[in-house]
Amino acid sequence: MKRLLFSLVLLFTFSLSAIAQSIETGIEFYEEGNYERALRIFEQSNNPSAQLFAGKSYYALNNFIKAKEYLGKVDSTSSEIFSEAKYTASLADFQLKNFAASLDALHELKQNSREPSVSRAAFSFYRDVVNYLTLEQRFNTFRATKYDAVRLDLVEAGVGKLDLVSARALFKAYKASTISDTTNYASIEALLSDSAAYMQRYNPNRYTKAPSGLAYNIGVALPQFEIESPQFEIPQHLYFGIQLAVEKFNSENTDLKAFLTYKNTGADAANAPAIANELAWNHDADIIIGPLFSEVAVAMSQYAELYEIPMLTPLANSDSLNLDHNYTYQLNPTFAIQGQRMAQFAIRNLGYDTLAVIAERGSLGEPSAVAFLDEARKLGGEVVRYYVEELESEGYDISKYARNFDPEVDTVFNYNIDAVYAPFTGNIAETLISSLLTNLEAIGTDMTVLGSEEWEMADIDSRNLPDTEIYYTKTFEQNPGNTDIEDFESEFRLRFDTEPNRFALIGYDAANVALRTLKRVQNPAYLKEGLKKFNNYRGLIMDVSFQNTHINQEVSIKQLQYKERAGEQ
């Protein structure tokens, strides 16, 4: 009997030794960042250390719910392991935006933990979280926490961060919720009753710092084309540019990191719901860059609203994309914005007050024409000729409209038109541009032409229009004086072994808009507000100012140069 018992003890001791050795191997994998391999070891054991590191591994893989399941299995027999598991679970709750559960656990740890290192970490993270919360998050956490002390800390941390009316309401709610004596908080009440003193502490444009180590998740929703397709390099270089911006951000910031998740949208808008749901549910996206096409962007924008995830479109410029959407931001100015900016340029910069408009009905230039008309009138200008017509049936001959620009023909009103706005777009733009120039030659006028980006390629050197000036809008253009472009091109070639095209620069700028906004607001819940206030960005290929809107308001206006004149200068 004794011999058998001795054998069992030996076997049990050997098994414990093997388990411990296996866990040590798993911890080595964990420390190397090989979390999946580590999990294959930890999930085979009910040992508290294995459960702790299984939870920590899932946390590192951003699977916070599963992390909490394993961390919750750790019992309290080992104070050190239990405290670390509880602390890690509080981090998981923070990532899941369960702020009340996170703060309650941290409060318990900083009050009761016998592990000094865990207690210090809990105190530090607790302080960061109560400072970090938005008004809405603070409101929900205040109601959900089970500790009066946490509610008080939410009040105190909100003083100077919340607007005065909200801070007063929060303090009133605290007094109504507690059975404790609130006379000790007379200093808070005094500050809240003194508007002038409070406003000295409150800055509406200041955002609180995020807890150290916060990671931002950026979803990238772009199509993928066959390598033989002429469109292949568009999304590829967009993504490369985004990737380079994120890598640079991570190298320059020790306390904040950003991670990318790419999803192939294809060109079919029917794919948008699945992509949006995937990024929201399974990747916890804080912001989405993309989609590429307006049709897909319109479909995805509905889900951006539902999940309250800002969506930053780099190229889509449909005027219908932004209607009633609070979470959709367009970097490429819409055609309406381009028309509005051209009207401002004509009246404010060129000093014109008598204008004409001609555009094709149903084209992308129609919203430009309508916006030009509205803005010109708002600024005191007069649009005396406004033609937005169906031109295809007339063979795109605009003579019958253009002849009315001639004051000698228009004997009734005899308008002396300063400029005509002609936002021609699409495949027919070249034909319409040629037709308008031919008519202006026939009239013999020095009327200025204001146009869309298609006018950049207009052949005016062969025309007899020596005094005609032509201006056109442009949304993406490299700044030749920007030395950062050379650095970017060099880094891009080194990183991806290919030459960057213009879409790489667009992707880089788009990512920088997202990253700079995240760094400024810290809490992704402020992104919607932060993007609207994002102004004066001078990028590699685009300038960005949202000016409290959802559409980039920066439009360059260029003057078309005659080659002969340029040669004479």
Image: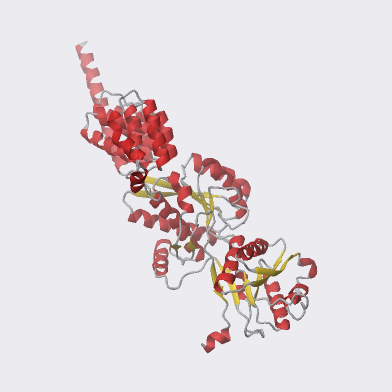
Q: Quadrant of the N terminus?
A: top left
Q: Position of residue 105 (x, y in %)?
A: 33, 30
Q: Position of residue 7 (x, y in %)?
A: 23, 18
In the picture shown, does residue 376 fall above or below 529?
below
**Residue displayed at 58% across by 77% down:** 560
In the picture shown, does residue 187 fall above or below 146?
below
* Residue farthest along the right direction in this orientation: 393
Residue 100: quarter of image: top left
Q: Position of residue 280 (x, y in %)?
A: 50, 41
Q: Nearer the viewer, residue 22 or 168?
A: 168
Q: Nearer the viewer, residue 407 or 364?
A: 407
Q: Mark yes or no: residue 22 visible.
A: no
Q: Position of residue 159 (x, y in %)?
A: 35, 40
Q: Nearer the viewer, residue 148 or 453?
A: 148
**Residue displayed at 69% across by 62% down:** 363
Q: Mark yes or no: residue 120 visible.
A: yes
